[in-house]
Amino acid sequence: MGMSVGGAGNGKVNSDINTTPLVDVMLVLLIIFLITIPVAVSAIKVHLPRDVNKPRVSNPHNIVVTVDRSGDIFWNDLRMPNVQVFLQRLDKASVANPQPEVQIRGDSATEYGSIGRVLYACQRAGIVKVSFLIQPPVRN
């Protein structure tokens, strides 16, 4: 990048803009876009789930399992003394026809291991439908 400071003794300053660096930068940007666009376009096509707020129909046969912040497990409103008693109750409920859905309400301060024990007990009992109950987000 330079500027011509004069010619053969005429004393005029040549103030033309040198566009070579501009063309170089534009070519580099063009090459970058040409390389990255096929990667972004050829991603695997999947249909992502949409956020919908459907009111849930409460079925009296559903089992609401609550896990408080200390990790205690509650069957509806009855406190379970340990996981083995909870698993025995799940075993009895899993043979019902139709099988009830287990809805887990976990405190936001609950450790993940406490919720994991409930999920593992549901899996061992053969419960097919397990869902999490959450507080819906505030809409403006």
Image (spheres, helix red, strand yellow):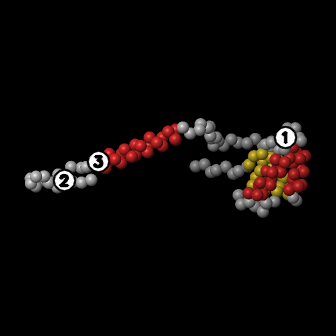
Q: Residue at x 79, y 60 (%)?
A: 71
| Left or right: where 70 falls relative to 43 | right
Query: Pointer 2: what residue?
Result: 4
| Left or right: where 54 falls relative to 39 | right
Rendered view: 139 above or below 47:
below
Mark 2 residue type? Ser
Query: Which marked residue is nearer to the observer: mark 1 or mark 2?
Result: 2
Query: Which marked residue is nearer to the observer: mark 1 or mark 3?
Result: 3
Query: Pointer 3: what residue?
Result: 20
Provide residue 127's location: percent of width, then percent of height: 83, 44
Provide residue 100's location: percent of width, then percent of height: 83, 42
Q: Are marks 1 and 2 in contact (CB under 8 Å)?
A: no
Dividing the picture into quadrants, the one containing residue 110 is bottom right
The answer to which of marks 3 and 2 sits earlier in the sequence is 2
Q: CA distance from mark 1 to mark 3?
A: 74 Å
Q: CA distance from mark 3 to mark 2?
A: 15 Å
Q: Residue at x 9, y 54 (%)?
A: 9
Q: Residues within 10 Å of mark 3 (few under 14, many from 20)?
A: few
The answer to which of marks 1 and 3 sits earlier in the sequence is 3
Mark 1 residue type? Gln
Residue placed farthest to the front in the image? 8
